[in-house]
Amino acid sequence: MSSPADRPATAIGVPRETKSQEARVSMTPAPVGALVKRGHAVFVETGAGAGASYPDEQYVAHGASLVEDAAAVHAAADLIVKVKEPQRDEIALLEPRHTLFTYLHLAASKPLTEALVASGCTAIAYETIEVNGHLPLLEPMSEIAGRMSSLVGSYHLAKHTGGRGILLGGVPGVAPGRVVVIGGGTAGINAARVARGIGADVTILEVDFERMRFLDITMDGTHTLYSTEANLAELLPRADLVIGAVLVPGAAAPKLITREMLAMMAPGSVFVDIAVDQGGCAETTRPTTHDAPTFVEEGVIHYCVANMPGAYARTATQALSSVTQRWIELIAGRGLADACREQPELLGGINVAGGRLTCAPVGEAHGLPVVDAAEALAIDS
């Protein structure tokens, strides 16, 4: 095992995000400066931070080298740090020498999974690194998406957007709108807090009784109900806004809402599916973008934007960069093998390595063979 002092500097690349309406950037200038001070080289694509209001000059001031395009980033760097899964043009730039560190959500896309395997790169997913029962690199984005879901849901209930014309908070003499949140995790609890803050009548569906006790104690005025098909079917006809906040780490989201169940909802009601990144929790879910965020199925407005936090790019960038920094420093400073020995939870983030798939839930979702991450990287204990 080598010491950090024995290791050569790592070349780190920060490309500009190319997913539609994705304005986040993977690192703010300050963490870039911290990496440079540790002796690493950081290559930032021109304009990478512009969408989050971080101009090129700030990266240069912190010691980064600007390069003209994604091809130059990938040519110069071995560790590629991104926000969203690589798009087709970006996948073509990946080589076996590259380690990709980003949100992947591979269970939602077999073609992306197979393309990453074929590239030979090592791909580490933020969303499958689990520490003490938490997903520290996913939770900040879940908090943003959760809070945002109640806001966009409330907006699309307005008549001029095609909604029912329901004001979630009601007014004196008029009952508030009803919100159903499916899942009481990080996204769900943040969705419920904002909906409750608006003044809505909120019910959270959850399967973990301990979690329900926690919600009952901490979420004053919010109802909790055990998540079953029967309970959901009973709530849907009376719901104005339904928020899907279901998460099974690394796996495809379960389809909890069938088309027939959705048809029980009143015309002009709204469904926001935060779980769309993992395939969505309704049969009718399909990914949309911030350019065209909604569509209508069975009379219900669907908001299924696959990168919701991208709408608040500066806030989301700051939140993401603050939690990824120590992991980037660990991988760059120790090398991936030693980093995994020092922080074994990192192995759970490795989804693809050495031309093989290493994430069991993704393999199950697509019917693909899986090997152990430590074996794929030849990491001994």
Image (cartoon, grey):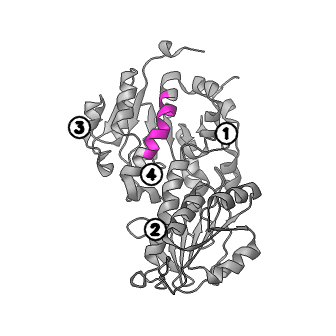
Determine contact: label 4, label 2, CB under 8 Å: no
Q: Which mark is residue 87?
A: 4
Q: Secondary structure at mark 2?
A: helix
Residue 305 appears in the figure:
no
Give the mark, 4 or 2, whose residue is nearer the N terminus: 4
Amino acid beneath label 3: Glu
Q: Please state the horizontal and vertical placement of residue 304, each as a whole percent of the image.
A: 51, 67
Circle number at residue 151: 2
Disc 4, SS: loop
Q: To which quarter of the image does residue 337 belong?
A: top right
Please rate how many residues cluster around mark 1, counting C-alpha atoms within 10 Å: few if below 14, some from 14 to 19, many from 20.
few
Residue 301 placement, left or right of 30: right
Give the crowd class for mark 4: few <14, some 14-19, many >=20 residues within 10 Å.
Answer: few
Up the image or down, 222 lies above or below 311; here it is: below
**Residue 64 image point, x, y percent:** 31, 31
Numbered tag placed on residue 132 in the rendering: 1
